[in-house]
Amino acid sequence: MLKNINLGFAVKVGIIGLGLMGGSLAYDMRSKYEDAYIIGFDHNDKHCIEALKLGIADKIVDNLSEIKNVDILFLAVPVDAIISIIQNLHDIDAHTTIVDLGSTKEKIISSIPDDIRSNFVAAHPMTGTEKSGPTAAIKGLYHGKAVVLCDIENSGKEHAELAKEIFENIGMKIFYMEAKEHDKHAAYISHMPHALSFALATSVMKQENPKAIIALAGGGFRDMSRIAKSSPNMWTDIFRQNKEHLIDAIECFEGELDKCKTMVQNQEWEDLYNWMQEANSLHKIL
Amino acid sequence: MLKNINLGFAVKVGIIGLGLMGGSLAYDMRSKYEDAYIIGFDHNDKHCIEALKLGIADKIVDNLSEIKNVDILFLAVPVDAIISIIQNLHDIDAHTTIVDLGSTKEKIISSIPDDIRSNFVAAHPMTGTEKSGPTAAIKGLYHGKAVVLCDIENSGKEHAELAKEIFENIGMKIFYMEAKEHDKHAAYISHMPHALSFALATSVMKQENPKAIIALAGGGFRDMSRIAKSSPNMWTDIFRQNKEHLIDAIECFEGELDKCKTMVQNQEWEDLYNWMQEANSLHKIL
Protein backbone atom coordinates (compact mmCIF):
# COMPACT_ATOMS: atom_id res chain seq x y z
CA MET A 1 0.00 0.00 0.00
CA LEU A 2 2.68 2.45 1.04
CA LYS A 3 4.67 1.86 -2.14
CA ASN A 4 1.59 2.33 -4.34
CA ILE A 5 0.79 5.59 -2.67
CA ASN A 6 4.32 6.70 -3.44
CA LEU A 7 4.23 5.50 -7.05
CA GLY A 8 7.57 3.78 -6.68
CA PHE A 9 9.37 6.69 -5.07
CA ALA A 10 10.93 6.32 -1.63
CA VAL A 11 8.35 6.66 1.13
CA LYS A 12 8.82 9.83 3.12
CA VAL A 13 8.27 9.49 6.84
CA GLY A 14 8.27 12.37 9.30
CA ILE A 15 8.93 11.72 12.99
CA ILE A 16 8.40 14.50 15.49
CA GLY A 17 10.09 13.46 18.71
CA LEU A 18 13.24 11.34 18.31
CA GLY A 19 13.18 9.62 21.70
CA LEU A 20 12.40 6.06 22.76
CA MET A 21 9.09 5.79 20.88
CA GLY A 22 10.02 7.76 17.75
CA GLY A 23 13.52 6.30 17.50
CA SER A 24 12.35 2.71 17.97
CA LEU A 25 9.63 3.29 15.37
CA ALA A 26 12.28 4.50 12.90
CA TYR A 27 14.29 1.29 13.45
CA ASP A 28 11.23 -0.92 12.95
CA MET A 29 10.03 1.07 9.91
CA ARG A 30 13.43 0.72 8.25
CA SER A 31 13.44 -3.04 8.71
CA LYS A 32 10.12 -3.29 6.83
CA TYR A 33 10.36 -0.36 4.40
CA GLU A 34 13.91 -0.37 3.11
CA ASP A 35 13.33 2.66 0.95
CA ALA A 36 11.96 4.80 3.79
CA TYR A 37 13.42 8.30 3.97
CA ILE A 38 13.01 9.58 7.51
CA ILE A 39 12.90 13.25 8.35
CA GLY A 40 13.22 14.03 12.06
CA PHE A 41 12.32 16.97 14.25
CA ASP A 42 13.09 17.38 17.94
CA HIS A 43 13.31 20.48 20.14
CA ASN A 44 16.40 19.01 21.80
CA ASP A 45 19.55 19.64 19.71
CA LYS A 46 21.49 16.85 21.39
CA HIS A 47 18.73 14.40 20.49
CA CYS A 48 18.88 15.56 16.85
CA ILE A 49 22.62 14.90 16.63
CA GLU A 50 22.24 11.50 18.33
CA ALA A 51 19.35 10.55 16.04
CA LEU A 52 21.46 11.24 12.95
CA LYS A 53 24.40 9.28 14.35
CA LEU A 54 22.20 6.34 15.26
CA GLY A 55 20.57 6.28 11.83
CA ILE A 56 17.16 7.07 13.28
CA ALA A 57 16.71 10.01 10.93
CA ASP A 58 18.16 10.63 7.46
CA LYS A 59 17.70 14.35 7.79
CA ILE A 60 16.88 16.72 10.64
CA VAL A 61 14.78 19.83 10.10
CA ASP A 62 14.52 22.66 12.58
CA ASN A 63 11.18 24.03 11.53
CA LEU A 64 7.82 22.29 11.71
CA SER A 65 6.92 23.54 8.20
CA GLU A 66 9.76 21.49 6.74
CA ILE A 67 8.42 18.18 8.02
CA LYS A 68 4.87 18.49 6.70
CA ASN A 69 5.66 17.33 3.17
CA VAL A 70 5.75 13.60 3.95
CA ASP A 71 3.57 10.57 3.31
CA ILE A 72 3.14 9.82 6.97
CA LEU A 73 3.94 11.98 9.97
CA PHE A 74 4.30 10.41 13.43
CA LEU A 75 3.91 12.53 16.56
CA ALA A 76 6.06 10.83 19.19
CA VAL A 77 6.26 13.57 21.81
CA PRO A 78 4.65 13.97 25.27
CA VAL A 79 0.87 14.31 25.11
CA ASP A 80 0.70 18.07 25.79
CA ALA A 81 3.21 18.69 23.00
CA ILE A 82 1.05 16.61 20.64
CA ILE A 83 -1.89 18.93 21.26
CA SER A 84 0.25 21.97 20.73
CA ILE A 85 1.84 20.65 17.50
CA ILE A 86 -1.42 19.63 15.84
CA GLN A 87 -2.66 23.22 16.09
CA ASN A 88 0.10 24.04 13.59
CA LEU A 89 -0.64 21.38 10.98
CA HIS A 90 -3.59 23.12 9.24
CA ASP A 91 -1.90 23.42 5.88
CA ILE A 92 -0.86 19.80 5.66
CA ASP A 93 -1.49 17.99 2.35
CA ALA A 94 -4.74 15.99 2.15
CA HIS A 95 -2.70 12.84 1.42
CA THR A 96 -0.41 13.12 4.42
CA THR A 97 -1.36 10.74 7.20
CA ILE A 98 -0.79 12.02 10.74
CA VAL A 99 -0.44 9.40 13.51
CA ASP A 100 0.00 10.38 17.13
CA LEU A 101 1.46 7.85 19.59
CA GLY A 102 0.18 9.49 22.78
CA SER A 103 -0.81 7.54 25.90
CA THR A 104 -4.08 9.50 26.26
CA LYS A 105 -6.66 9.85 23.53
CA GLU A 106 -9.77 11.90 24.46
CA LYS A 107 -8.07 15.25 24.99
CA ILE A 108 -5.83 14.80 21.96
CA ILE A 109 -8.67 13.84 19.62
CA SER A 110 -10.89 16.68 20.81
CA SER A 111 -8.10 19.13 20.06
CA ILE A 112 -7.64 18.12 16.39
CA PRO A 113 -8.63 21.00 14.10
CA ASP A 114 -11.65 20.02 11.96
CA ASP A 115 -9.87 20.63 8.67
CA ILE A 116 -7.24 17.94 9.37
CA ARG A 117 -9.42 15.49 11.29
CA SER A 118 -9.57 13.02 8.41
CA ASN A 119 -5.75 13.03 8.07
CA PHE A 120 -5.48 12.00 11.69
CA VAL A 121 -5.15 8.49 13.15
CA ALA A 122 -5.10 8.44 16.96
CA ALA A 123 -2.94 5.54 18.12
CA HIS A 124 -1.58 4.25 21.43
CA PRO A 125 1.09 1.59 21.09
CA MET A 126 1.12 -0.27 24.43
CA THR A 127 4.86 -0.55 24.67
CA GLY A 128 7.82 1.38 25.98
CA THR A 129 10.44 1.27 28.68
CA GLU A 130 11.27 3.59 31.56
CA LYS A 131 14.06 5.18 29.50
CA SER A 132 13.98 8.15 27.18
CA GLY A 133 15.93 9.87 24.41
CA PRO A 134 17.27 8.51 21.07
CA THR A 135 19.85 6.31 22.80
CA ALA A 136 16.97 4.53 24.57
CA ALA A 137 15.46 3.51 21.21
CA ILE A 138 15.53 -0.24 20.58
CA LYS A 139 14.85 -2.46 17.61
CA GLY A 140 11.72 -4.58 17.87
CA LEU A 141 10.08 -2.46 20.60
CA TYR A 142 6.75 -2.62 18.77
CA HIS A 143 6.86 -6.26 17.76
CA GLY A 144 4.13 -8.45 19.26
CA LYS A 145 2.64 -5.55 21.25
CA ALA A 146 -0.88 -4.10 21.22
CA VAL A 147 -1.73 -0.81 19.55
CA VAL A 148 -5.09 0.84 20.15
CA LEU A 149 -6.59 2.88 17.30
CA CYS A 150 -9.27 5.24 18.61
CA ASP A 151 -12.39 6.66 16.97
CA ILE A 152 -11.07 5.27 13.70
CA GLU A 153 -14.39 6.01 11.91
CA ASN A 154 -13.41 9.67 11.97
CA SER A 155 -10.12 9.04 10.17
CA GLY A 156 -10.11 9.14 6.37
CA LYS A 157 -10.14 5.68 4.81
CA GLU A 158 -6.71 5.95 3.12
CA HIS A 159 -5.16 7.26 6.35
CA ALA A 160 -6.71 4.56 8.54
CA GLU A 161 -5.55 1.87 6.10
CA LEU A 162 -2.01 3.18 5.85
CA ALA A 163 -1.62 3.40 9.62
CA LYS A 164 -3.09 -0.07 10.04
CA GLU A 165 -0.76 -1.49 7.37
CA ILE A 166 2.33 -0.02 9.02
CA PHE A 167 1.41 -1.17 12.53
CA GLU A 168 0.69 -4.66 11.22
CA ASN A 169 3.92 -4.75 9.26
CA ILE A 170 5.97 -3.91 12.33
CA GLY A 171 4.24 -6.79 14.13
CA MET A 172 1.61 -5.07 16.25
CA LYS A 173 -1.80 -6.42 17.30
CA ILE A 174 -4.46 -3.83 16.48
CA PHE A 175 -7.37 -3.03 18.80
CA TYR A 176 -10.16 -0.57 17.99
CA MET A 177 -11.77 1.47 20.73
CA GLU A 178 -13.56 4.69 21.49
CA ALA A 179 -11.24 7.30 22.96
CA LYS A 180 -13.11 7.36 26.26
CA GLU A 181 -12.97 3.59 26.67
CA HIS A 182 -9.26 3.66 25.81
CA ASP A 183 -8.53 6.30 28.43
CA LYS A 184 -10.36 4.29 31.09
CA HIS A 185 -8.54 1.08 30.20
CA ALA A 186 -5.18 2.88 29.91
CA ALA A 187 -5.69 4.32 33.40
CA TYR A 188 -5.90 0.77 34.82
CA ILE A 189 -3.27 -0.92 32.67
CA SER A 190 -0.68 1.82 32.55
CA HIS A 191 -1.30 5.18 34.22
CA MET A 192 -2.37 4.00 37.70
CA PRO A 193 0.44 1.36 37.79
CA HIS A 194 2.89 4.20 37.11
CA ALA A 195 1.42 6.13 40.05
CA LEU A 196 1.94 3.01 42.23
CA SER A 197 5.53 2.62 41.14
CA PHE A 198 6.31 6.30 41.80
CA ALA A 199 4.62 6.05 45.23
CA LEU A 200 6.53 2.86 46.07
CA ALA A 201 9.82 4.57 45.21
CA THR A 202 9.06 7.71 47.24
CA SER A 203 7.86 5.70 50.24
CA VAL A 204 11.18 3.83 50.35
CA MET A 205 13.23 6.97 49.70
CA LYS A 206 11.69 8.75 52.69
CA GLN A 207 12.80 6.04 55.12
CA GLU A 208 15.64 6.74 57.53
CA ASN A 209 18.20 4.69 55.61
CA PRO A 210 16.95 3.97 52.09
CA LYS A 211 20.35 2.62 51.01
CA ALA A 212 20.23 -0.16 53.60
CA ILE A 213 16.73 -1.12 52.46
CA ILE A 214 17.48 -0.97 48.75
CA ALA A 215 20.64 -3.07 49.16
CA LEU A 216 18.25 -5.96 49.81
CA ALA A 217 16.19 -5.47 46.64
CA GLY A 218 15.31 -8.71 44.85
CA GLY A 219 13.53 -9.18 41.54
CA GLY A 220 10.11 -8.25 42.93
CA PHE A 221 11.13 -4.81 44.09
CA ARG A 222 13.17 -4.18 40.94
CA ASP A 223 10.16 -4.97 38.78
CA MET A 224 7.74 -2.97 40.91
CA SER A 225 9.97 0.11 40.97
CA ARG A 226 11.28 -0.01 37.38
CA ILE A 227 8.70 2.35 35.87
CA ALA A 228 9.33 4.83 38.71
CA LYS A 229 12.36 5.79 36.58
CA SER A 230 10.02 7.19 33.93
CA SER A 231 10.20 10.80 32.76
CA PRO A 232 8.35 13.24 35.08
CA ASN A 233 7.86 15.52 32.10
CA MET A 234 6.02 12.91 30.07
CA TRP A 235 4.03 11.53 33.01
CA THR A 236 2.87 14.84 34.47
CA ASP A 237 1.26 15.49 31.07
CA ILE A 238 -0.38 12.07 30.96
CA PHE A 239 -1.74 12.38 34.52
CA ARG A 240 -3.13 15.84 33.64
CA GLN A 241 -4.79 14.64 30.45
CA ASN A 242 -6.28 11.51 31.99
CA LYS A 243 -7.05 13.06 35.38
CA GLU A 244 -10.57 11.69 35.96
CA HIS A 245 -9.96 8.11 34.86
CA LEU A 246 -6.65 8.04 36.73
CA ILE A 247 -8.30 9.16 39.97
CA ASP A 248 -11.03 6.52 39.53
CA ALA A 249 -8.40 3.81 39.00
CA ILE A 250 -6.31 4.99 41.98
CA GLU A 251 -9.43 4.95 44.17
CA CYS A 252 -10.34 1.46 43.04
CA PHE A 253 -6.79 0.35 43.87
CA GLU A 254 -6.88 2.14 47.24
CA GLY A 255 -10.05 0.20 48.07
CA GLU A 256 -8.30 -3.10 47.35
CA LEU A 257 -5.15 -2.20 49.28
CA ASP A 258 -7.23 -1.01 52.21
CA LYS A 259 -9.13 -4.30 52.12
CA CYS A 260 -5.80 -6.11 52.34
CA LYS A 261 -4.61 -3.94 55.23
CA THR A 262 -7.86 -4.40 57.13
CA MET A 263 -7.73 -8.18 56.74
CA VAL A 264 -4.17 -8.16 58.11
CA GLN A 265 -5.17 -5.86 60.98
CA ASN A 266 -8.20 -7.99 61.83
CA GLN A 267 -6.26 -11.22 61.33
CA GLU A 268 -8.78 -12.49 58.78
CA TRP A 269 -6.31 -14.95 57.28
CA GLU A 270 -8.75 -17.09 55.36
CA ASP A 271 -10.23 -14.01 53.68
CA LEU A 272 -6.72 -12.79 52.92
CA TYR A 273 -5.89 -16.15 51.37
CA ASN A 274 -9.00 -15.97 49.17
CA TRP A 275 -8.20 -12.39 48.16
CA MET A 276 -4.69 -13.44 47.08
CA GLN A 277 -6.21 -16.30 45.09
CA GLU A 278 -8.46 -13.78 43.34
CA ALA A 279 -5.30 -11.82 42.45
CA ASN A 280 -3.71 -15.04 41.12
CA SER A 281 -6.66 -15.40 38.72
CA LEU A 282 -5.43 -12.41 36.69
CA HIS A 283 -2.79 -14.67 35.28
CA LYS A 284 -5.28 -17.04 33.77
CA ILE A 285 -5.93 -14.16 31.36
CA LEU A 286 -2.48 -12.54 31.15
CA MET B 1 35.46 -25.77 55.59
CA LEU B 2 32.65 -28.08 54.66
CA LYS B 3 35.04 -30.82 53.55
CA ASN B 4 37.08 -30.53 56.74
CA ILE B 5 33.99 -30.88 58.84
CA ASN B 6 33.19 -34.03 56.89
CA LEU B 7 36.69 -35.42 57.13
CA GLY B 8 36.73 -36.28 53.43
CA PHE B 9 33.37 -37.99 53.37
CA ALA B 10 30.57 -36.70 51.14
CA VAL B 11 28.79 -33.74 52.68
CA LYS B 12 25.26 -34.60 53.72
CA VAL B 13 22.69 -31.89 53.08
CA GLY B 14 19.08 -32.01 54.19
CA ILE B 15 16.46 -29.86 52.46
CA ILE B 16 12.99 -29.60 53.92
CA GLY B 17 10.72 -28.14 51.25
CA LEU B 18 11.60 -29.07 47.67
CA GLY B 19 10.03 -26.09 45.92
CA LEU B 20 11.48 -23.07 44.19
CA MET B 21 13.84 -22.07 47.03
CA GLY B 22 14.90 -25.53 48.19
CA GLY B 23 15.16 -26.94 44.69
CA SER B 24 17.20 -24.02 43.36
CA LEU B 25 19.46 -24.27 46.40
CA ALA B 26 20.08 -27.94 45.63
CA TYR B 27 21.11 -27.06 42.06
CA ASP B 28 23.49 -24.33 43.24
CA MET B 29 24.92 -26.49 46.05
CA ARG B 30 25.66 -29.32 43.60
CA SER B 31 27.54 -26.98 41.28
CA LYS B 32 29.88 -25.97 44.14
CA TYR B 33 29.96 -29.16 46.24
CA GLU B 34 30.18 -32.03 43.77
CA ASP B 35 30.20 -34.62 46.52
CA ALA B 36 27.03 -33.30 48.17
CA TYR B 37 24.48 -35.99 49.06
CA ILE B 38 21.08 -34.34 49.30
CA ILE B 39 18.26 -35.79 51.36
CA GLY B 40 14.86 -34.24 50.69
CA PHE B 41 11.62 -34.01 52.64
CA ASP B 42 8.34 -32.53 51.43
CA HIS B 43 4.77 -33.09 52.58
CA ASN B 44 3.65 -33.10 48.94
CA ASP B 45 4.19 -36.56 47.35
CA LYS B 46 4.11 -35.17 43.81
CA HIS B 47 6.88 -32.73 44.72
CA CYS B 48 8.97 -35.59 46.13
CA ILE B 49 8.72 -37.57 42.89
CA GLU B 50 9.50 -34.49 40.80
CA ALA B 51 12.49 -33.60 42.99
CA LEU B 52 13.99 -37.07 42.48
CA LYS B 53 13.42 -36.90 38.71
CA LEU B 54 14.97 -33.44 38.48
CA GLY B 55 18.01 -34.46 40.50
CA ILE B 56 17.18 -32.01 43.28
CA ALA B 57 17.34 -34.77 45.90
CA ASP B 58 19.34 -38.00 45.93
CA LYS B 59 16.99 -39.57 48.41
CA ILE B 60 13.56 -38.71 49.77
CA VAL B 61 12.58 -39.51 53.35
CA ASP B 62 9.05 -39.45 54.66
CA ASN B 63 9.79 -38.82 58.29
CA LEU B 64 11.42 -35.79 59.85
CA SER B 65 13.58 -37.99 62.07
CA GLU B 66 15.31 -39.43 59.00
CA ILE B 67 16.58 -36.06 57.80
CA LYS B 68 18.20 -34.92 61.04
CA ASN B 69 21.44 -36.81 60.56
CA VAL B 70 23.03 -34.35 58.11
CA ASP B 71 25.82 -31.77 58.18
CA ILE B 72 23.51 -28.94 57.21
CA LEU B 73 19.73 -28.83 57.17
CA PHE B 74 17.90 -26.15 55.17
CA LEU B 75 14.32 -25.23 55.99
CA ALA B 76 12.81 -24.02 52.73
CA VAL B 77 9.12 -24.11 53.58
CA PRO B 78 6.55 -21.35 54.25
CA VAL B 79 7.32 -19.38 57.43
CA ASP B 80 4.60 -20.93 59.60
CA ALA B 81 5.82 -24.40 58.68
CA ILE B 82 9.37 -23.38 59.67
CA ILE B 83 8.16 -22.55 63.17
CA SER B 84 6.29 -25.80 63.43
CA ILE B 85 9.22 -27.92 62.16
CA ILE B 86 11.83 -26.41 64.47
CA GLN B 87 9.79 -27.50 67.48
CA ASN B 88 10.64 -31.06 66.40
CA LEU B 89 14.39 -30.70 66.01
CA HIS B 90 15.36 -30.94 69.72
CA ASP B 91 17.41 -34.09 69.37
CA ILE B 92 19.51 -32.84 66.47
CA ASP B 93 23.27 -33.41 66.66
CA ALA B 94 25.31 -30.50 68.06
CA HIS B 95 27.31 -30.42 64.79
CA THR B 96 24.31 -30.16 62.49
CA THR B 97 23.78 -26.64 61.20
CA ILE B 98 20.16 -25.59 60.68
CA VAL B 99 19.49 -22.74 58.24
CA ASP B 100 16.01 -21.40 57.64
CA LEU B 101 15.29 -19.43 54.45
CA GLY B 102 12.14 -17.71 55.67
CA SER B 103 11.09 -14.20 54.58
CA THR B 104 10.38 -13.13 58.16
CA LYS B 105 12.84 -13.41 61.01
CA GLU B 106 11.58 -12.13 64.39
CA LYS B 107 8.81 -14.67 64.93
CA ILE B 108 10.93 -17.53 63.62
CA ILE B 109 13.94 -16.70 65.81
CA SER B 110 11.83 -16.25 68.92
CA SER B 111 10.33 -19.69 68.37
CA ILE B 112 13.67 -21.57 68.27
CA PRO B 113 13.94 -23.92 71.27
CA ASP B 114 16.85 -22.86 73.53
CA ASP B 115 18.64 -26.19 73.27
CA ILE B 116 19.11 -25.84 69.49
CA ARG B 117 19.57 -22.06 69.30
CA SER B 118 23.29 -22.33 68.62
CA ASN B 119 22.71 -24.78 65.73
CA PHE B 120 20.47 -22.26 64.09
CA VAL B 121 21.35 -19.67 61.44
CA ALA B 122 18.43 -17.42 60.49
CA ALA B 123 18.78 -16.41 56.83
CA HIS B 124 16.68 -14.59 54.27
CA PRO B 125 17.93 -14.89 50.70
CA MET B 126 16.43 -11.91 48.83
CA THR B 127 15.59 -13.84 45.70
CA GLY B 128 12.78 -15.89 44.25
CA THR B 129 10.18 -15.79 41.53
CA GLU B 130 6.39 -15.86 41.58
CA LYS B 131 6.44 -19.59 40.83
CA SER B 132 6.48 -22.53 43.18
CA GLY B 133 7.17 -26.27 43.34
CA PRO B 134 10.25 -28.28 42.26
CA THR B 135 9.67 -27.58 38.54
CA ALA B 136 9.99 -23.84 39.33
CA ALA B 137 13.53 -24.39 40.68
CA ILE B 138 16.22 -22.75 38.56
CA LYS B 139 20.00 -22.88 38.46
CA GLY B 140 21.74 -19.70 39.57
CA LEU B 141 18.73 -18.28 41.46
CA TYR B 142 20.97 -17.31 44.38
CA HIS B 143 23.90 -15.97 42.37
CA GLY B 144 24.62 -12.26 42.86
CA LYS B 145 21.70 -11.81 45.25
CA ALA B 146 21.64 -10.54 48.83
CA VAL B 147 21.17 -12.81 51.84
CA VAL B 148 20.46 -11.38 55.27
CA LEU B 149 21.78 -13.29 58.29
CA CYS B 150 19.97 -12.21 61.45
CA ASP B 151 21.07 -12.11 65.09
CA ILE B 152 24.14 -14.07 64.01
CA GLU B 153 25.81 -13.56 67.43
CA ASN B 154 23.38 -16.12 68.80
CA SER B 155 24.42 -18.77 66.29
CA GLY B 156 27.30 -21.07 67.22
CA LYS B 157 30.56 -20.08 65.56
CA GLU B 158 30.96 -23.25 63.47
CA HIS B 159 27.35 -22.98 62.29
CA ALA B 160 27.59 -19.30 61.38
CA GLU B 161 30.81 -19.95 59.47
CA LEU B 162 29.47 -22.92 57.57
CA ALA B 163 26.31 -21.04 56.51
CA LYS B 164 28.39 -18.02 55.51
CA GLU B 165 30.78 -20.19 53.49
CA ILE B 166 27.96 -21.86 51.59
CA PHE B 167 26.12 -18.61 50.80
CA GLU B 168 29.36 -17.04 49.60
CA ASN B 169 30.22 -20.06 47.51
CA ILE B 170 26.91 -19.93 45.70
CA GLY B 171 27.60 -16.27 44.92
CA MET B 172 25.51 -14.40 47.49
CA LYS B 173 26.27 -11.02 49.10
CA ILE B 174 25.94 -11.35 52.88
CA PHE B 175 24.31 -8.69 55.06
CA TYR B 176 24.08 -8.88 58.87
CA MET B 177 21.11 -7.42 60.68
CA GLU B 178 19.00 -7.67 63.79
CA ALA B 179 15.81 -9.61 63.18
CA LYS B 180 13.63 -6.60 63.90
CA GLU B 181 15.52 -4.37 61.49
CA HIS B 182 15.33 -7.11 58.86
CA ASP B 183 11.58 -7.45 59.23
CA LYS B 184 11.10 -3.70 58.87
CA HIS B 185 13.30 -3.55 55.76
CA ALA B 186 11.72 -6.69 54.28
CA ALA B 187 8.28 -5.12 54.71
CA TYR B 188 9.34 -2.22 52.46
CA ILE B 189 11.43 -4.10 49.93
CA SER B 190 9.32 -7.23 49.56
CA HIS B 191 6.17 -7.71 51.64
CA MET B 192 4.41 -4.38 50.97
CA PRO B 193 5.29 -4.56 47.23
CA HIS B 194 3.60 -7.97 47.16
CA ALA B 195 0.49 -6.42 48.74
CA LEU B 196 0.54 -3.74 46.01
CA SER B 197 0.83 -6.30 43.25
CA PHE B 198 -2.03 -8.39 44.67
CA ALA B 199 -4.17 -5.23 45.03
CA LEU B 200 -3.34 -4.12 41.48
CA ALA B 201 -4.42 -7.51 40.13
CA THR B 202 -7.68 -7.58 42.10
CA SER B 203 -8.55 -4.00 41.15
CA VAL B 204 -8.25 -4.88 37.45
CA MET B 205 -10.07 -8.21 37.87
CA LYS B 206 -13.10 -6.52 39.41
CA GLN B 207 -13.62 -4.25 36.39
CA GLU B 208 -16.52 -4.88 34.05
CA ASN B 209 -14.37 -6.42 31.31
CA PRO B 210 -10.95 -7.35 32.67
CA LYS B 211 -10.06 -9.27 29.48
CA ALA B 212 -10.40 -6.15 27.34
CA ILE B 213 -8.17 -4.22 29.74
CA ILE B 214 -5.56 -6.94 30.11
CA ALA B 215 -5.33 -7.42 26.32
CA LEU B 216 -3.58 -4.03 26.32
CA ALA B 217 -0.97 -4.94 28.93
CA GLY B 218 2.54 -3.71 28.14
CA GLY B 219 5.77 -4.34 30.00
CA GLY B 220 4.90 -1.99 32.88
CA PHE B 221 1.72 -3.81 33.85
CA ARG B 222 3.33 -7.21 33.36
CA ASP B 223 6.15 -6.27 35.73
CA MET B 224 3.83 -4.68 38.29
CA SER B 225 1.47 -7.66 38.36
CA ARG B 226 4.04 -10.48 38.11
CA ILE B 227 4.37 -11.13 41.85
CA ALA B 228 0.56 -11.19 42.15
CA LYS B 229 0.98 -14.77 40.86
CA SER B 230 2.70 -15.70 44.13
CA SER B 231 1.43 -18.48 46.38
CA PRO B 232 -1.41 -17.36 48.72
CA ASN B 233 -0.34 -20.07 51.13
CA MET B 234 3.18 -18.74 51.47
CA TRP B 235 2.17 -15.08 51.53
CA THR B 236 -0.67 -15.35 54.04
CA ASP B 237 1.92 -16.76 56.45
CA ILE B 238 4.40 -13.95 55.73
CA PHE B 239 1.77 -11.23 56.15
CA ARG B 240 0.70 -12.82 59.46
CA GLN B 241 4.24 -13.07 60.79
CA ASN B 242 5.23 -9.55 59.74
CA LYS B 243 1.86 -7.95 60.47
CA GLU B 244 2.99 -4.77 62.25
CA HIS B 245 5.84 -3.82 59.91
CA LEU B 246 3.71 -4.64 56.88
CA ILE B 247 0.90 -2.37 58.07
CA ASP B 248 3.40 0.45 58.72
CA ALA B 249 4.85 0.06 55.23
CA ILE B 250 1.38 -0.07 53.61
CA GLU B 251 0.39 3.09 55.49
CA CYS B 252 3.55 4.87 54.40
CA PHE B 253 2.79 3.87 50.81
CA GLU B 254 -0.88 4.92 51.17
CA GLY B 255 0.34 8.35 52.27
CA GLU B 256 2.47 8.70 49.14
CA LEU B 257 -0.25 7.48 46.79
CA ASP B 258 -2.77 9.78 48.43
CA LYS B 259 -0.33 12.67 47.98
CA CYS B 260 -0.16 11.81 44.28
CA LYS B 261 -3.95 11.62 43.97
CA THR B 262 -4.42 14.93 45.78
CA MET B 263 -1.91 16.70 43.54
CA VAL B 264 -3.77 15.38 40.47
CA GLN B 265 -7.15 16.40 41.93
CA ASN B 266 -5.86 19.87 42.83
CA GLN B 267 -3.99 20.19 39.54
CA GLU B 268 -0.71 20.87 41.33
CA TRP B 269 1.37 19.87 38.32
CA GLU B 270 4.67 21.36 39.40
CA ASP B 271 4.47 19.58 42.74
CA LEU B 272 3.56 16.36 40.93
CA TYR B 273 6.57 16.79 38.65
CA ASN B 274 8.85 17.25 41.68
CA TRP B 275 7.34 14.21 43.40
CA MET B 276 8.02 12.08 40.31
CA GLN B 277 11.59 13.37 40.27
CA GLU B 278 11.95 12.29 43.89
CA ALA B 279 10.77 8.82 42.81
CA ASN B 280 13.37 8.84 40.00
CA SER B 281 16.10 9.39 42.62
CA LEU B 282 15.63 5.83 43.91
CA HIS B 283 17.47 4.66 40.85
CA LYS B 284 20.61 6.55 41.73
CA ILE B 285 20.89 3.93 44.48
CA LEU B 286 19.32 0.88 42.84
Image (cartoon, coloured by chain):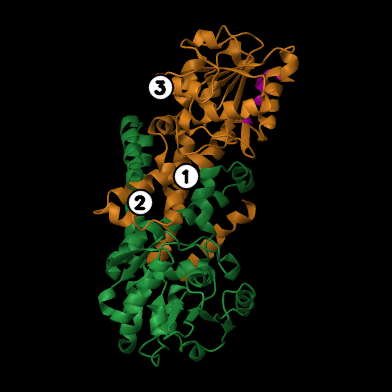
Chain colours: A green, B orange
Crowding around mark 2 (Cα neighbors within 10 Å: few <14, some 14 to 19, many 20+) is many
Of residues B42 and A164, the one nearer the viewer is A164
Crowding around mark 3 (Cα neighbors within 10 Å: few <14, some 14 to 19, many 20+) is few
A231 magenta-colored:
no
Amino acid type of disc 3?
Lys
A274 to B271, vertically: above or below:
above
Picture disc at residue A266: none
Chain holding disc 1: B
Q: Quadrant of residue A271?
A: top left
Mark 3 vs mark 1, foreground winner is 3
B154 magenta-colored:
yes
Contact between labelled residues 2 and 1, with CB atoms less than 8 Å apart: no
Residue beneath the point at 37% across and 72% down: A165
A239 to B15, vertically: above or below:
below
User: Percent from the top left, x then y, of residue A249?
Assistant: 34, 57
B249 to B174, vertically: above or below:
below
Q: Quadrant of residue A117?
A: bottom left
Q: Is residue A143 left or right of residue B94?
A: left
- Does residue B17 appear anywhere in the picture? no
Mark 2 vs mark 3, foreground winner is 3
- Residue wearing tag 2: A253
Quarter in which the N terminus of chain B is drawn: top right
Residue beneath the point at 40% across and 40% down: B229
- Residue wearing tag 3: B46
Chain holding disc 2: A
